Image: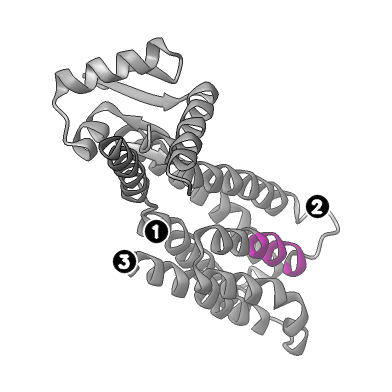
Amino acid sequence: MKLEKISAQEQLNLIEQTITQAKENLSNHSFAFIYWGWLVSFTALVNYALLNFSPLGNNSYLIWPVTSILGIVFIVGYYKKAEKTESHRTHLEYFLSRMWIVIGLVLVLFSVLSPFIDLNPWFFFPLVAGIGTIVSGVVLKFNPLIFGGMVLIGFPFYSMLVNGSSLLLLYAAVIMVSYLVPGYALKRYRA
Amino acid sequence: MSLLIKLKSASFVYLKEQLNATQGNLSVQLNKLKDADYIRIEKRFEGNYPLTEVKITPAGIQAFETHVRNLKDYLHL
């Protein structure tokens, strides 16, 4: 009887130990934040330079759909290649990848359509990206991402304090705070 | 099953490494679980290499949860 009891306890301990063994590797999630962080902040800075120091004027905003499409083509290729060699996938990884695919498609679609429709990109884009970032932070239990998402969602409000093309400089700085800082922190994170 | 419950999918190699099992032993155990409809095994080729992917089924999740509940009841936890 006693032996059976020990055996049941051992079984439970083994189950608990094995579940812990398959814990989330947070640093795997950092690539996308670092990648989009650099791409978006770089695009904002190039857009600022083209707007102020080139004859392109408002046409320089076309850099956004161009970099968005190139960005998504590269990252889809990257994840397709990574998927072939991955040894396992957690439910959380699956959920986050699907959520960001939907958000990414919405952002690219509206980025392409924005020159033709009456949409304030400085409201819509930070809001959608911010929601995704907060959700990622909540499910990964990683506070820098939650903070980054909040900074993004707040952008339409505090950006009213800035005029003209300086908005692009502010956006580049906000992306660095909300994507690059949490992205690098996530990369170095050890559970 | 404890490992698979946390994962959406896992390769045979990953399971072998995590469980410190031999190839033959793991194959036998996986086939038993497959016959009970607790897991699904998919085989495909990635390039020139065969890849065996294992996924837990809803019946497997239910059976695992029942097993853990029974263990806890038995231990009065």
Q: Nearer the viewer, residue A99 or B13?
A: B13
Q: Residues within 10 Å of mark 3 (few under 14, many from 20)?
A: few
The outermost residue toward the right is A118
Q: Nearer the viewer, residue A20 or A110?
A: A20
Please name the residue that numbered disc 2 is placed on: A116
Query: SS class of the residue under badge 2?
Result: loop
For residue B19, above or below residue A50: above
Query: SS class of the residue under badge 1?
Result: helix
Amino acid identity at mark 2? Phe
Residue A56 falls in which quadrant of the image? Answer: bottom right
Q: Is residue A154 left or right of residue A146?
A: right
Amino acid identity at mark 1? Leu
Dot in front, 3 or 2: 3
Q: Can I make out residue A7 in this image? A: yes
The answer to whether tags 1 and 2 share a subunit is: yes
Q: Is residue A2 left or right of residue A43?
A: left
Lower position in the chain sequence, tag 1 or tag 2: 1
Mark 3 in CB contact with mark 1 (< 8 angstroms) = no
Task: Name the image quarter holding the C terminus of chain A.
Answer: bottom left
| Residue A73, position as x, y percentages in the image | 49, 43
The answer to whether tags 3 and 1 share a subunit is: yes
Q: Nearer the viewer, residue B28 or B10?
A: B28
Please name the residue that numbered disc 1 is placed on: A26
- Residue at 61% over, 76% down: A171
Q: Residues within 10 Å of mark 2 (few under 14, many from 20)?
A: few
Let me know if residue A125 is in the magenta part. yes
| Residue A67, position as x, y percentages in the image | 54, 55
Which residues lie in the magenta part?
A122-131
- Residue at 43% over, 60% down: A35
Amino acid identity at mark 3? Arg
Let me know if residue B44 is in the magenta part. no
